[in-house]
Image: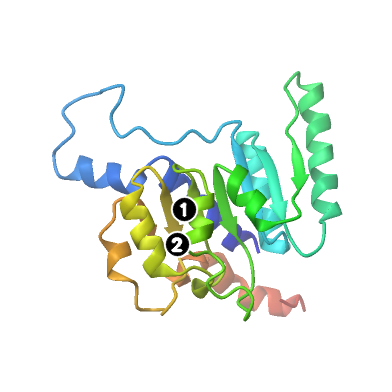
Amino acid sequence: TETTAEMAVALTMACSRRIVEADGFTRTGNFKGWLPDLLQGKRLWRSTVGIIGAGRIGSAYALMMVKAFQMNLIYSDNNRNYELEKQLDAYNEYLEKAGSLPVSVRYANSNDAVLKEADVVSLHIPLTKETHHMISEKQLLTMKPDAVLINTSRGPVIDEAVLAEHCKTYPDCAAGLDVFEYEPIIHDGLKELPNVTIAPHIASATRWTRENMSKLAALNVKG
C-alpha cells in the first residue's frame, strides 16, 4: 500500500516540478545560471488533489499529499470513506492548533466532479469492464488545462493514444505513469513528450520488502 502510494507521490512531484526535464536540461550543459522563470513548475501547496478510488492505496496517497502540502481533497469512490475523512478531521484539528487554515475534504458523487476541480488527479481503481478506458478524450477535456494526471493503478483505465494526443495539444498539462495499456509496450507518442513522466511498473517495489521477507516469515507476519 505505502510503496505504491509513495510512487504516486514521486510521479506527482516529478510532473509538477518538471524534474525529468530539469535533469536533462542540466546534464546537457544548458544551465547557464539562475533565472526566475526557468522551467517553472506547478505549485502544489494549498491546491486541490483529486482521488478517483479511495481504497487503501488511494487513501494513503491522499493523506501523504494533504499532509505534505496542505492540499484540499476531493475524492470519488463507490462508497464514502469515513475513515479517511476522520483522519483528515484530526489533521484539521492539528492545523487549527498550529494557527493554520484548515483543508477541505469533499466526497464527490461523480468522477467528473473530481476531474473538473482537481489540480492533481490520481487514479487508484481496479481494471474492470466499466473502468476500461475510463479516462479518454471527454474526461481529459474535463480536466484543467494544466492539471497533472497520475496513474499507478492499471494501464488500460486510460486510453493511451488519446492521452498522448492530449498532452501534445496541451503542453501545460502533465501525466505520470508507471502502468501502461499494453504493458510492457508503451505508446510511442507518450515517450516523445516532455510533459509525460514514465517509469516501469516494478518501480513501486522496495528493497525493504525483499530483504525482510525472511524476517517477516520468522515472525509469522503474513502479507
User: Toward which corner of the image does residue 145 lie, by quadrant?
Assistant: top left
175 up-or-down from 132: above or below: above
Give the side of residue 31 with respect to residue 67, left or right: left
Q: Which residue is mark 2?
A: 177
Q: Is residue 119 visible?
A: yes
Front residue of 18/50: it is: 50
Judged from the image, the secondary structure of the residue bearing numbered disc 2 is strand
Where residue 13 appears, as percent x and y from the top left, is 47, 45
Amino acid type at circle 1 is Leu
Amino acid type at circle 2 is Leu
- Image quarter where the N terminus lies is bottom right
Residue at point 56%, 65% (across, down):
208
Q: Which residue is mark 1?
A: 11
Residue at point 69%, 74% (across, down):
216
Residue at point 40%, 65% (across, down):
162
Judged from the image, the secondary structure of the residue bearing numbered disc 1 is helix
User: Toward which corner of the image does residue 96 lie, by quadrant?
Assistant: top right
Q: Are marks 1 and 2 in contact (CB under 8 Å)?
A: yes
Residue at point 73%, 63% (across, down):
55
Where residue 200 appears, as percent x and y from the top left, is 41, 69
213 up-or-down from 49: above or below: below
- Spatial separation of the CA atoms under disc 1 and disc 2: 7 Å
- Image quarter where the C terminus lies is bottom right
Residue furthest to the left: 29
If you read the primary sequence from the N terminus, does the residue marked by circle 1 or circle 2 appear first? 1
Q: Residues within 10 Å of mark 1 (few under 14, many from 20)?
A: many
Give the side of residue 166 with respect to residue 99, left or right: left
Q: Is residue 199 visible?
A: no
